[in-house]
Image (tube, rainbow, N blue to C red):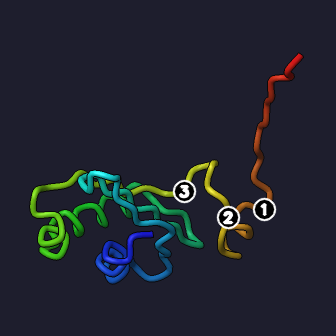
Amino acid sequence: MNDTLKNIVEPHLTNGQVLLDAREDSRGNYLRIVIDSEDNITLDDTTRLTKVLRDSTEIDSVYPSGYRLEVSTPGLNNSLKFPFQYKKSIDRTLAVSYIKNE
């Protein structure tokens, strides 16, 4: 996790939201923020954070040449890190398929 980006993002999270990841690509112009919460994260939540960060002078000063910003929630390929993530996944159905190598 990029500590500079983490320090910029965390103060803008609402109560109960957790920053899971804050990364920039190797060129430094694509920023990916991943958040989660015990409650479901909505599209309004990610949109609000995107707008707040986009309007932030802190990010503009760190990335003066511009950047692309993605704010999202963890996908299926992300491991669970916090107890609340396990708890909110109880009783969820997951369909798994596989291809048998012959």
SS class of the residue under badge 3? loop
Name the residue type under label 3.
Pro
Q: Position of residue 22 (x, y in %)?
A: 41, 66
Residue extending furthest toward the right? 102
Dot 3 or dot 1: first in sequence order is 3
Q: What is the quadrant of the C terminus in the image?
A: top right
Residue beneath disc 3: 74
Residue beneath disc 2: 80
Asked if 60 appears above or below 27 in the picture, the reply is below
Name the residue type under label 2.
Leu
Name the residue type under label 1.
Ile
Q: Position of residue 14 (x, y in %)?
A: 39, 78
Residue 86 quadrant: bottom right
Residue at screen point 10% across, 63% down: 64
Decide: few, some or many residues near mark 1? Use Cα within 10 Å; few <14, some 14-19, many ≥20: few
- Front residue (pair 100, 86): 100
The label on residue 90 is 1
